[in-house]
């Protein structure tokens, strides 16, 4: 682990980067096989998807960024790269495999990995000393979640986000719109072809 909190090899030669990528994919695939209904894809999102999803975020006003279903941390490192030094990233996942992996591989005082459900985001945010989140990111497969879970997540997410903040969602389908529309008046949409599979992008903004 280096001084930046990155695992050895992340900034090394191509062999180190390939070995790291292979290890990450192995953990990600294992998590998918154990809990396929809770993981949105069999492989991590592309860097193009990551960049597009994070483009609208006003990082200067972001004190707390929350992510649901971080997996192996595909978004975690880019978010931490953009966050200010006194901001916080909280990630929430129901799979202990992913939480343990992230706690071992990301050494950053601004990072907190929580084993739990996104339905309980309000309590998790309070437990970590915050009143609200500025942005919430999710790649959870809303169409395959157990009955009642997706609507509960949508409602709790709207409550926890500050006015002017946003709920960022990337999916292979538009099923998440039924979760977002009851709570968010403005929803911007996009599409990223350079992903396996190509995915739909959504940014739902909470009214000021």
Image (cartoon, rainbow, N blue to C red):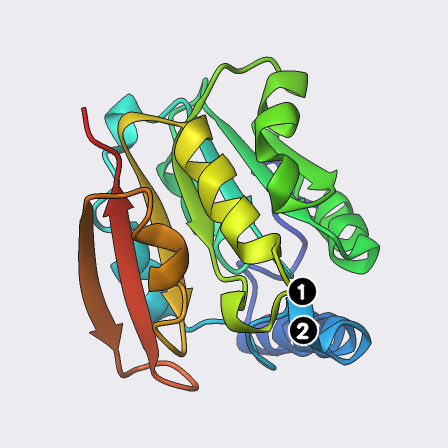
Quarter of the image holding residue 191? bottom left
Q: Is residue 32 left or right of residue 198?
A: right
Mark 1, other Cα within 10 Å: few <14 / some 14–19 / many ≥20: few
Out of 193 and 110, give the one closest to the viewer. Answer: 193
Out of 87 and 201, give the one closest to the viewer. Answer: 201
Q: Where is residue 52 in the image (x, y as percent from the top left)?
A: 26, 61
Residue visible at 28% across and 59% down? 202
Q: Which mark is residue 138?
A: none
Q: Position of residue 130 (x, y in %)?
A: 53, 15
Q: Position of residue 80 (x, y in %)?
A: 46, 39
Residue visible at 75% across and 43% down? 103
Q: In this view, does 74 lie to the left or right of 71?
A: left
Q: Helix, strand or loop at disc 1?
A: loop
Q: Helix, strand or loop at disc 2?
A: helix
Compared to residue 62, the image places residue 67 above or below, namely below
Out of 147 and 77, give the one closest to the viewer. Answer: 147
Q: Where is residue 98 in the image (x, y as percent from the top left)?
A: 74, 57
Residue under pointer 1: 146
Q: Which quarter shows the C terminus?
A: top left
The residues tagged by marks 1 and 2 sit, at their Cα atoms, a distance apart of: 8 Å
Compared to residue 184, the image places residue 61 above or below, namely above
Compared to residue 103, the image places residue 109 above or below, namely above
Quarter of the image holding residue 149? bottom right
Residue visible at 71% across and 38% down? 114
Out of 131 and 44, give the one closest to the viewer. Answer: 131
Residue under pointer 2: 37
């Amino acid at each position: 682990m280096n001084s930046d909190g990155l695992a050895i090899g992340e900034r090394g030669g191509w062999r180190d980067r390939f070995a790291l990528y292979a290890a990450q994919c192995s953990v990600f695939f294992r998590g998918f096989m154990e809990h396929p209904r809770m993981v949105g894809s069999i492989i991590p999102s592309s860097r193009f998807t990551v960049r597009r999803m994070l483009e609208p975020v006003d990082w200067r006003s972001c004190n707390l960024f929350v992510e649901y279903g971080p997996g192996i941390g595909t978004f975690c490192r880019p978010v931490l790269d953009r966050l200010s030094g006194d901001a916080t990233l909280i990630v929430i996942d129901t799979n202990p495999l992913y939480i343990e992996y992230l706690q071992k591989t990301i050494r950053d005082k601004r990072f907190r990995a929580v084993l739990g459900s996104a339905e309980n985001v309000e309590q998790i945010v309070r437990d970590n000393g915050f009143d609200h989140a500025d942005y919430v990111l999710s790649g959870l497969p809303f169409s395959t979640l157990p009955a009642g879970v997706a609507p509960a997540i949508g409602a709790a997410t709207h409550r926890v986000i500050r006015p002017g903040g946003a709920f960022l969602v990337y999916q292979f389908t538009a099923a998440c719109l039924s979760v977002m529309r009851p709570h968010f008046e403005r929803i911007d949409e996009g599409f990223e072809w350079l992903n396996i599979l190509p995915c739909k992008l959504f940014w739902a903004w909470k009214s000021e």
